[in-house]
Image: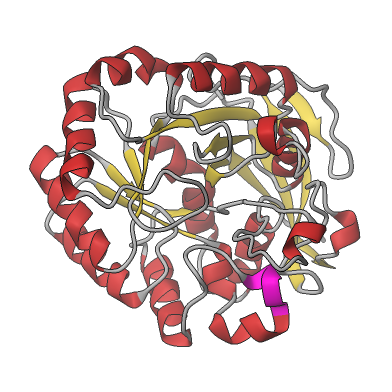
């Protein structure tokens, strides 16, 4: 007999959608379609895809395109760039989910290594008076450096894709000290390690890179204990041709595999049903101050078992590092504001159905 789990308004707060200058990799329609197929009602899009979302003009361009093309609901980050303008932050705050700051190497040219500029962004966001978080890409000792700014400015800081035992240690202490922090971890860091890279080749390359089994065990312990707040996909697809080329393209798709992998973790007794709901729905909505419409939810058949296959994916790139893996939990339906947008097989709404979740409750 099927065991149906209902998740209220799942949100993936860390995706790199495709479209605009990178439309050859996918579109806002294809990738928000992948979100629905993966059980998500909404996604929060990162600012480092071209044109980078670091000016009000670029922000408006992206929001206009997403409003016309998206089938899931959505939100966008504004990128911390070479200037920290509090006047701009105050002006755009109502339209965005927060600020994203890249403190370690990643795709694009938004890296901020200067400690004074990092602090200037924290100070500017504080002056803007917004409660939404600053999300950071910080690795290793950089986590400790950002925590010092979190402590000084008392701003909620969301640490994206944490991947090592060292980083978990810093953040565990920060939470014990009462700092306003939250922790995101990806499924690929939970279910893959550096030992898988020889097998996966370019399909196992992302930032942060896959880590050791020791790090993986530390992540699972932090998830199981409730220290980790969010499982986020870090969805970042590239074409098969790009991944097969001599140039290195970092990033993997993940929108369609995150919730099924968590259902597998549930079956493996690594997490409980209550934790699963918190990791993909309750906590992301709390952290990013997202209102919830009770008619937005996802239904999952926890008894279903299936193999992830590239040919069945909705993402335009058509591949997954988890291809061939047996998982639990089939998405049987997604509803947004009472409309069934995905029926387990097909997207049921046209491009443009999705809304900015700060303009209409999810």
In magenta segment, residue 25: no
Residue 54 visible in rendering:
yes
Quadrant in which the C terminus appears: top right
* Percent coordinates x, y for residue 311 in the rendering: 91, 58
Q: Tell me what residue is drawn at x 49 percent, y 55 percent.
A: 274
| Number of on-image labels | 0
Q: Which residues are magenta?
A: 200-204
In the picture as drawn, the residue positioned furthest to the front comes out as 246
In magenta segment, residue 202: yes
Task: Say left or right for 279 vs 183.
Answer: right
- From the image, give the main secondary structure of the stretch colored magenta: helix
Residue 2 visible in rendering:
no
**In-front residue for pair 28/74:** 28
Question: Above or below — where is 123 with respect to 111?
Answer: above
* Percent coordinates x, y for residue 301 in the rendering: 76, 54
**In-front residue for pair 113/251:** 113
Task: Say left or right for 100 vs 251.
Answer: left
Question: Above or below — where is 102 with respect to 2?
Answer: above
* Percent coordinates x, y for residue 202 in the rendering: 68, 71
* Percent coordinates x, y for residue 187 in the rendering: 57, 64
Q: Tell me what residue is drawn at x 49 percent, y 16 percent.
A: 57
Quadrant in which the N terminus appears: bottom right
Residue 33: quadrant of the picture: top right
Q: Tell me what residue is drawn at x 46 percent, y 24 percent.
A: 291
Residue 308: quadrant of the picture: bottom right
Question: Above or below — where is 135 with respect to 142?
Answer: above
Question: Above or below — where is 188 with respect to 238?
Answer: below
Q: How are the residues colored? A: secondary structure
Q: Tell me what residue is drawn at x 18 percent, y 57 percent.
A: 145
């Amino acid at each position: 007999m099927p065991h149906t789990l209902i998740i209220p308004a799942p949100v993936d707060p860390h995706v790199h959608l495709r479209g605009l200058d990178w439309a050859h990799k996918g579109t806002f329609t294809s990738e928000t379609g992948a979100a629905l197929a993966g059980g998500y009602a909404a996604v929060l899009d990162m600012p480092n895809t071209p044109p980078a979302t670091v000016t009000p003009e670029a922000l408006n361009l992206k929001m206009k395109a997403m409003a016309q093309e998206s089938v899931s609901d959505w939100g966008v980050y504004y990128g911390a760039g070479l200037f920290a303008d509090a006047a701009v932050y105050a002006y755009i705050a109502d339209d965005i989910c927060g600020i994203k700051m890249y403190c370690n190497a990643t795709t694009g040219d938004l890296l901020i290594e200067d400690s004074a500029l990092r602090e200037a962004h924290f100070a500017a966001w504080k002056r803007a008076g917004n409660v939404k978080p600053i999300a950071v890409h910080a690795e290793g000792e950089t986590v400790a450096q950002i925590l010092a700014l979190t402590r000084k400015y008392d701003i909620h800081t969301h640490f994206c894709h944490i991947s090592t035992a060292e980083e978990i240690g810093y953040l565990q202490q920060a939470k014990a000290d009462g700092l306003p922090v939250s922790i995101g971890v990806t499924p690929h860091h939970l279910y893959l390690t550096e030992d898988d890279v020889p097998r996966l080749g370019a399909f196992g390359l992302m930032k942060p890179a896959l880590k050791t089994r020791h790090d993986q065990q530390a992540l699972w312990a932090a998830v199981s204990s409730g220290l980790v707040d969010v499982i986020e996909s870090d969805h970042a697809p590239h074409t098969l041709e790009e991944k097969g080329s001599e140039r290195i393209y970092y990033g993997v798709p993940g929108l369609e595999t995150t919730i099924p992998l968590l259902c597998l973790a549930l079956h493996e007794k690594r997490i409980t049903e209550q934790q699963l709901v918190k990791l993909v729905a309750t906590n992301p909505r709390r952290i990013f101050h997202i209102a919830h419409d009770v008619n937005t939810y996802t239904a999952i058949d926890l008894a279903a078992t299936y193999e992830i296959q590239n040919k069945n994916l909705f993402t335009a790139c058509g591949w997954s590092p988890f291809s061939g893996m047996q998982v639990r939990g089939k998405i049987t339906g997604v509803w947004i504001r009472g409309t069934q947008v995905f029926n387990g097989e097909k997207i049921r709404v046209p491009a443009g159905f999705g809304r900015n979740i700060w303009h209409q409750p999810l």
